[in-house]
Amino acid sequence: MSSQSISIPAGNIPSSNLGPIKRVRVREHVNPLGQRYQSATQPPDWEAVYADWSKPLSLDIGCGRGEYILQMAQLKPDWNWLGLEIREPLVHSAIAAQRSLNLHNLHYIFCNANTSLAGLLPRHKIQQLTIQFPDPWFKRRQHKRRVVQPQLVQDLSALLVPGAQVLLQSDILMVAQEMLKHFEADPRFVNLAGRGQFADRDIYPEHIPTDREAWTLQQGGNIYRVLLKFAAFSNQ
Ligand SMILES: C[S@@+](CC[C@H](N)C(=O)[O-])C[C@H]1O[C@@H](n2cnc3c(N)ncnc32)[C@H](O)[C@@H]1O
C-alpha cells in the first residue's frame, strides 16, 4: 500500500467512538429523489474552508452524524477530511463540533451526493473515498434511491487521484454486492481482494468503526467490506 495509505495501528483506535457531536433528532431517511434535493450544492471556497487545501483529501459520502471523520481528522491531521450528508440537521451539529474542536482539516457539506458531487470538487483531488453503510432501500422500486449508482461512480472517477483508495462497507449483502458491481464495471477500480471478492482482515486496513459499524458489531452482524484502488489506466 502507498505511503498515502491511512491504515491505523490497532493501538491507536479509541475504544469508544462517542465524540462531542450533539445528538439531534432527524428523520430516519430522506428520499434523495425528492424535489428538495435535486439542485446541486455549489462548492465553497475550498482554500478558505481548509487551513491547507494541498493536503490529501479523504471524502466520506453519507457521513451520517460525522463522527468517523471527526475522529479521523484528529488522528490524521496531515489529511483533509470532508463529509457529505443529505440530512441537514446532522451537518449543522457536525460543523458545531468541528468548530468547538478548532479543526481546520475537517468540513461537512449538506448535499445530495448524487446531484452535487460532480461539480463540488476539482478533478483528481480525492485521495481516499469511503462509503460506509449506505441506506439499503430494500424495496425493489426504491433501489434507485441508493447512493451508489453508475453515475456516481462515473462522477467519482473524474475526481479521484490515480492510486486513490476506495473503502466500501455494508451490513447488507445485497447492498455490498451492488456497490461492488457498480465500481467493478469500471476496470480502473481494481479490487484488491480479487474481482467480485470482499476484503478480509488481511487486506482491509485497521480503522475506526463508524456509528453503524459499531452497532452492527455489537449486534453480532456481518460486515461486507470492499477495498479498491483507483488505477489511472485500465491496465494498471
Ligand atoms: C445508514 S447511514 C450511515 C452513516 C455512516 N456512514 C455510518 O456508517 O454510521 C447512511 C447515511 O447516508 C446518508 N445519505 C443517503 N443518501 C445520500 C445522498 N444521496 N447524499 C448524501 N448523503 C446521503 C443518509 O442520510 C445517512 O445519514
Image: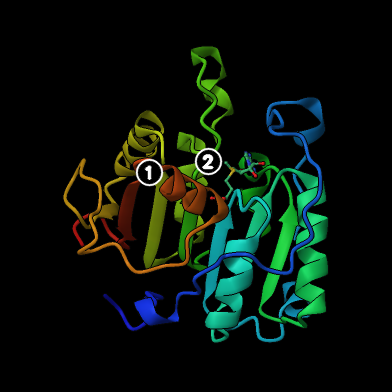
| Residue holding disc 1 | 220
Residue 121 in view = no
Viewed as shown, does residue 229 lie left or right of 54? left
Residue 216 quadrant: top left
- How far across and down, in percent of the image, does residue 172 sit? 40, 34
- How far across and down, in percent of the image, does residue 58 sit? 53, 68
Q: How is the image coloured?
A: rainbow
Q: Residue at x 57, y 63 (%)?
A: 68
Q: Residue at x 44, y 53 (%)?
A: 157
Q: Report the image quarter containing ligand 1.
A: top right
Residue 26 quadrant: top right
Q: 61 above or below 18?
A: above
Q: CA distance from mark 2 to mark 1?
A: 19 Å
| Residue holding disc 2 | 134
Q: Amino acid at mark 2?
A: Pro
From the viewer's side, name the closer residue of 221 and 202.
Answer: 221
Q: Residues within 10 Å of mark 2 (few under 14, many from 20)?
A: many
Indicate the secondary structure of the residue bearing disc 1. loop
Q: Amino acid at mark 1?
A: Gly
Q: Please identify the quadrant where the C terminus is shown.
A: bottom left
Q: 20 above or below 133?
A: below
From the viewer's side, name the closer residue of 179 and 151.
Answer: 179
- Choose mark 2 or mark 1, whichever is in front: 1
Indicate the secondary structure of the residue bearing disc 2. loop
User: Does label 2 point to a residue whose CB lies under 8 Å from ligand 1?
Assistant: yes
From the viewer's side, name the closer residue of 93 and 42.
Answer: 93
Viewed as shown, does residue 156 lie left or right of 34? left
Q: Residue at x 25, y 54 (%)?
A: 190
- How far across and down, in percent of the image, does residue 140 sit? 49, 14
Residue 204 in view = yes
User: Does label 1 point to a residue whose CB lies under 8 Å from ligand 1?
Assistant: no
- How far across and down, in percent of the image, does residue 127 sit? 46, 70
